Amino acid sequence: MSGPGKGQGDLDTVELRHASGASAQIYLFGATLTSYKTPDGVERIFVSPGAIFDGKKAIRGGVPLVFPQFGQPDKAMAQHGFARSSHWTLASVEDNIEGSTATLTLVDSEATRALWNHSFALEFVVSLTAASLKMTLKVTNTSEAPFSFQTLLHTYFRVSDIGEVGVRGLGGRTYLDKANGGKELQVSDVALPSFTDRVYVGGKDLASGNAAKDVLIIQKGGVSCAICNEGSIAGVPKPIEIVVWNPYEEKSPGDLPPPAFKEFVCVEPGLIGQMKDDFVEMHELPAGAVACISQKIIPTS
Ligand SMILES: O=P(O)(O)OC[C@H]1O[C@@H](O)[C@H](O)[C@@H](O)[C@@H]1O
């Protein structure tokens, strides 16, 4: 049976346990999903051995939720915003024949308004079945005026060796290369032989015209996982951005001691914004409207 639990640092979690043997764990701190095991018991998500579970610092690994900014366009706010380091509420957890589902929520508070002066309601829904795990983050603008925002699911996929990983499905898409600066066109699979930090642009206004949203992770020559990504704003499907990141040793942060970087690749779907020449114009969410991003993980081997 699924239900509340306790994780490292005595932090509250919700544990999803499906009849098939599949399981997942989500910390209420940051609504960070830290484990997804398929029925064969194989862990599909990476958490750093140096991750800090103090309820203050965002957990290094799992699926941190990026909101309301990606990176740090607003220097007064923490990188990737405050959702990943806020204490969320467990709204519901249920098991039924199809799957097990947990819903976590976060609304604005004095603390969030001091950083970002808007009213919002976030809902993070995780659904586990025998064959897949789906995460959906809904952002509702509960204020009376529109706001600009960015959001991503910063998923750390566990892999056996980053040097042998390929990401397929991004061919033909333009990317902003944060590691080297500049704009490039992806010609085939993404290989990650060194520090990689790329934002694959979702809009069709750039060179590629390709806004495909599904990608595959390739390991040892075969597909190990299919990832379906979707995004919408006010009910209208949007081309989503996909960030591909691995810091290697040179950019590994303190809570990711080398050689742990070898064991993951981040594939992060999000609504980052529309590209206007060389800068990003954030999406706007009208008052009362809802934006959604989702990622469905379907391990295949
Ligand atoms: O160290 P953080 O704040 O978790 O960020 C990790 C990485 O997150 C990625 O999404 C960014 O593209 C990188 O630039 C960043 O380094």
Image (spheres, grey):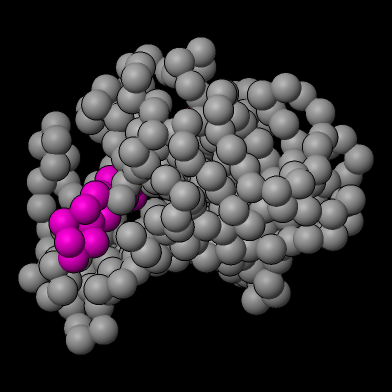
> Left or right: 56 with respect to 199?
left
Residue 250 lies, with reference to residue 269, above or below; the image says above
Q: Residue at x 47, y 62 (%)?
A: 226
**Between residues 185 and 152, which one lies in front from this camera angle?**
185
Q: Quadrant of the N terminus?
A: bottom left
User: Is residue 34 in the magenta section?
Assistant: yes
Q: Quadrant of the C terminus?
A: bottom left
Relative image position of residue 214 (x, y in whole percent): 58, 63
Relative image position of residue 126 (x, y in whole percent): 34, 64
Give the residues drawn in magenta, as a range: 31-43
**Between residues 144 and 76, which one lies in front from this camera angle?**
76
Q: Residue at x 20, y 86 (%)?
A: 97
Residue 59 lies, with reference to residue 122, above or below; the image says above
Whether residue 131 is visible, yes or no, is yes
User: Is residue 120 in the magenta section?
Assistant: no
**Between residues 2 and 78, which one lies in front from this camera angle?**
2
Residue 175, located in which quarter of the rendered image?
A: top right
Relative image position of residue 180 (x, y in whole percent): 72, 22
Residue 284, located in which quarter of the rendered image?
A: bottom right
Residue 297 lies, with reference to residue 129, above or below; the image says above
Whether residue 68 is visible, yes or no, is no
Q: Residue at x 61, y 31 (%)?
A: 197
Residue furthest to the bottom = 97
Q: How many labels, in total?
A: 0
Q: Residue at x 40, y 26 (%)?
A: 261
Residue furthest to the front = 221
